[in-house]
Amino acid sequence: MQPRILDKISRIIDKKNNLNYKIKKILEIEKKENLFKNESDYFAWDYLRSYFIRLLNRSDKSGKSYFWSHLINNILIKKKYFYLNYVPIFLNRSKKDIIFFGHNRGNLKKKVLHDEYLDSIINKFKKKKIQIFSYSHFFYGPKNNYKNKRFFIDYLDFLLKVKTIILFVFIIHKLKFIKTNKLKFELIVRYEQEKWWYNYFKSVKPVYLFIVDVHSHLPIVRAANRLKITIIEVQHGSPNSKKMEYLYSVPPNSRLSSPDYFLGFGKFWNRYISAKYYKKQFYSIGKKLDEKIPKLKKNNSNILVIDQLQFRKKLVNIAIKISKKNSSKISYRFHPNVSEKKSFSKKLKDNNISVSMPKSNYMAKDLSKVKTIIGVASTALLELSYKKYSVLIVPTEEFDFKNLLLQKKKYGLRELNNKLVRKSGLFHKPNFSIIKNIVK
């Protein structure tokens, strides 16, 4: 990898051009320079690409201060590394048919966590030899396990980071084209993770791998692809043309980061995923929203603002502005597992706006007496509109579904068209039997 290429991409990201332009230019470089074939020890374009995506999304948290605060929080507060039963040496190594990788959010009921993305799928394969992994819950840590019990991989990642710290001085020269040590460290950790998962998969020989969010688990996906394991991605967010993680310049068979199949909430989403994203086919499995989002009551009148990290300052200011001109009660729901909330929380409370620090994606408690929702580009906004809430969108280029908006405005914001959202097939009724077309 030549430093000039990285410098060129960095300059594109730093410019004030719109997001579509930046993504287009990066994809052009990716194709022209054949970056997916430019791999060596401790370097893969997939991993560096992930870093650039964070910069594009203004969500990079790989700095030194974040790393140490995150580590201290996991050790002293969540006590993640006190649960020695999750040390990799205790991991079952018998033959597996299917491996699942879940999300680290979930709703706690009677001390058991429930996963809105995987539970119904896992239930279809109880007769198979399965293994379920994920990071421990972002709030509860390893203290509570899921309905379908998981092996938490926090300890594994911790040990691989310790290994990287020890090896760093001996390896650093192999990444001399990378300017910062923090990024070198990240690339080496990713390489070590991929190597570990490759050896594990080779040992247990799974045929299928279900995964929620390929982009967040690239080492696992790359290791599985190297062994020709069938990878099935389960939708968790809202793919669109403003998210480079779903956009590629080369066919899926030309890289190790592609799933074979994509299981979507509805047929609507297939048009927003690049044909170069998955290898074989898109299937609509639907999504059940009734437990997550309660039915809207006629007498509801309150306003709920839904947080998004890169737009937090803007959303907080909008909430305060509306609170000064409106008699309705306003509350602000922070993103479940994104930190850095204290100063914003104080500012909101000082303006008589109640604050919610949710422990899962489930929204029933925060939606009590709420009629109107305000947000930017969260998938939850589309779910709420589908359930007939009045959803107002703060204008940003990140929102890619402007065709679903009404022209009429409230508080200066355009509203999602509930009827069109329901008609367009964003969320179908659950149909998990269709997965039998893949898993034999």
Image: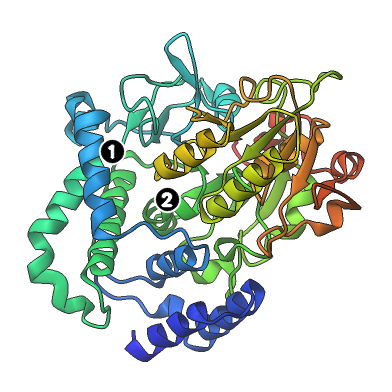
Name above or below for residue 200 compared with residue 145.
below
Q: Amino acid at mark 2?
A: His
Which residue is at 79% across, 25% downward? Answer: 301
- Image location of residue 393, percent across then percent down: 74, 50
Is residue 314 depicted above or below 294 in this figure?
A: below
Q: How crowded is the residue under tag 1: few (<14 C-alpha within 10 Å), some, or many (20+)? A: some
The residue pinned by badge 1 equals 154
Q: Position of residue 130 (x, y in %)?
A: 43, 29
294 or 187: which is nearer to us? 294
Tell me what residue is drawn at x 20 percent, y 34 percent. Answer: 75
Give the side of residue 147 with respect to residue 332, left or right. left
- Where is residue 363 drawn, in percent x and y? 62, 26
Q: Which residue is mark 2?
A: 217
- Assess whether mark 1 and mark 2 are in contact (beta carbons under 8 angstroms): no
Choose between 298 and 132: the one closer to the eye: 298
Quarter assignment of residue 203: top left
Q: Amino acid at mark 1?
A: Asp
Residue shown at 70%/50% (left/top)? 282
Q: Quadrant of residue 6?
A: bottom left
Name which residue lies at 36% across and 55% down. Answer: 219
Q: Report whether residue 324 is seen.
A: yes
What secondary structure is found at the residue carrying circle 2? Answer: helix
Residue 265 visible, this orientation: no
How many labels, in total? 2
Q: Is residue 218 left or right of residue 77?
A: right
Mark 2 surroundings: few (<14), some (14-19) or many (≥20) residues within 10 A: some
Q: Nearer the viewer, residue 313 or 33?
A: 313
Identify the disc placed on residue 199. none
